Image (cartoon, grey):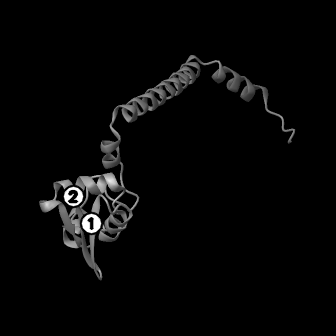
Amino acid sequence: MSTRSIDPETLLAILHAAKSANLEKLLDDVKKADKEVEDANAKLATAKQKLSEGVPPELASLLKPSKAGASKKGRSSKSGDPKADVADAKELKTLLNKAPDKKLDRKGLNALGYKLKSAKDIAKAEPKTFGVEESGAQGSVWLK
């Protein structure tokens, strides 16, 4: 630690500035703003918790973005866009219930923004609920 001396006039100016009403007001404003941010974060956490408790699981799985990089604006059917994995049997069942004849092939799944492979894997795991047809890279899944 350096032992440098400060001239008395500079020290007096520093002490005067520290006692300034403007500085005290600014410090109070910062404390108030910090408290407001803490309160807002607590309210946000509470609201998120209430929302997650009030949303049925089927809807919650549809609202969560997929891990495969689906955009927040929804899935796109452009062929260059990354496709998302079908998350689970509930999601596959929802997709198939909306499909004509309750059946989707690679083209239909890609148009919805999903990969056929993930849909086939889910369908194979639950043969009582889903049917699977494999034909190389092609294929289809359907609801029994």
Whether residue 96 sits left or right of residue 118 in the image: it is left
**Horizontal and vertical percent for residue 30?**
54, 26
Mark 1, mark 2: which one is toward the viewer? Answer: 1
Along the line of sight, the residue nearer the viewer: 128 or 85? 128
Query: Which residue: 65% across, 18% down?
Result: 19
Across the whole image, how many numbered discs are drawn on residues? Answer: 2
Q: Residues within 10 Å of mark 1 (few under 14, many from 20)?
A: some
Give the SS element for disc 2. helix
Whether residue 9 sits left or right of residue 76 in the image: it is right
Query: Which residue: 34% across, 55% down?
Result: 89
On screen, residue 30 above or below 140: above
On screen, residue 9 above or below 107: above
Rendered-image quadrant of the N terminus: top right
Q: Which residue is mark 1?
A: 131
Q: Which residue is mark 2?
A: 96
When asked about the image quadrant of residue 98, the answer is bottom left
Along the line of sight, the residue nearer the viewer: 58 or 110? 58
Q: Residue furthest bottom?
A: 136
**Horizontal and vertical percent for residue 119?**
31, 65
Q: Residues within 10 Å of mark 2 (few under 14, many from 20)?
A: many
